[in-house]
Amino acid sequence: MNKKLLVLFITILIVSCNDNKTQKTPDSPNKTQSNERKDDTNTQANENIVSESNHSNVDFTEEVKNFITCKKAATERNECRNSITKIITKTYDLTEFNDPKLGYVVYDSIRPIVEKSRNWIQLGSINQETINQALDHTNRGGLSLIIDTANTYGHVVMITPGETKKSGSWAMKLPNVLSLTNYKPEKSFYNKSLSYAMQKSDDLKIFLRQ
């Protein structure tokens, strides 16, 4: 009789333990699903940032190297002077800088094109407000150019996605840019501060592609 009671008692304990485990089990999938939803949300947010910042598969570092090599080997004036428009066109899938003979217009043709086009907005001279507007536009996937309008062959740079950083020489925060320097190609670069490409001037104008 005592043995039967002992067996019954042990059986009740086992069933009770199993019931407790069963009651806790449903919480685990919920927690897993919650974590998966958070991971999915974070992944989606990161993918959105990437999709807004990377407009193409253009290797900008390689394009800068190609430009420098091209300029060193150039024998004619117009050689390599369309490199910046080629990069802009490929990056943003544009057609307005195409040229039937050269493939792409030379860099000093950019200004007259954008000034006449309804597809472009001129923000005016550089100050912190216009710089911030241009970088916001770039970070949303838009094209922002800075052009030196002091002369016909003014330097043109393209703002790259990212954040502004304090420049002591400009006494303001500046974005990074892509700069292909025709008169000194070895000073060309990608994703360095605007201060490395241009000196502060009211002649520098910002243009946004709508």
Image (tube, rainbow, N blue to C red):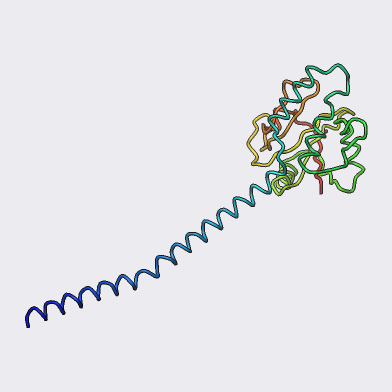
Residue 97 horizontal/vertical position (percent): 87, 38
Residue 22, image x, y percentages: 33, 72
Q: Residue at x 81, y 49 (%)?
A: 210
What is the quadrant of residue 28 in the picture?
bottom left
User: Of 12 and 140, which appears nearest the observer?
Assistant: 12
Residue 176 locus on image (x, y percent): 68, 35
**Where in the figure is residue 152, as x and y percent of width and height?**
90, 29
In this view, 8 is above or below 193:
below
> On the picture, is 56 further left or further right than 13?
right
Q: Quadrant of residue 170?
A: top right
Question: Which quarter of the figure is the N terminus placed in?
Answer: bottom left
Q: How many marks?
A: 0
Q: Does residue 147 appear to the left or right of 116 in the view shown?
A: left
Q: Nearer the viewer, residue 196 or 41?
A: 41
Can you say whether 74 is above or below 201 in the image? Answer: above
Q: Residue at x 59, y 50 (%)?
A: 46
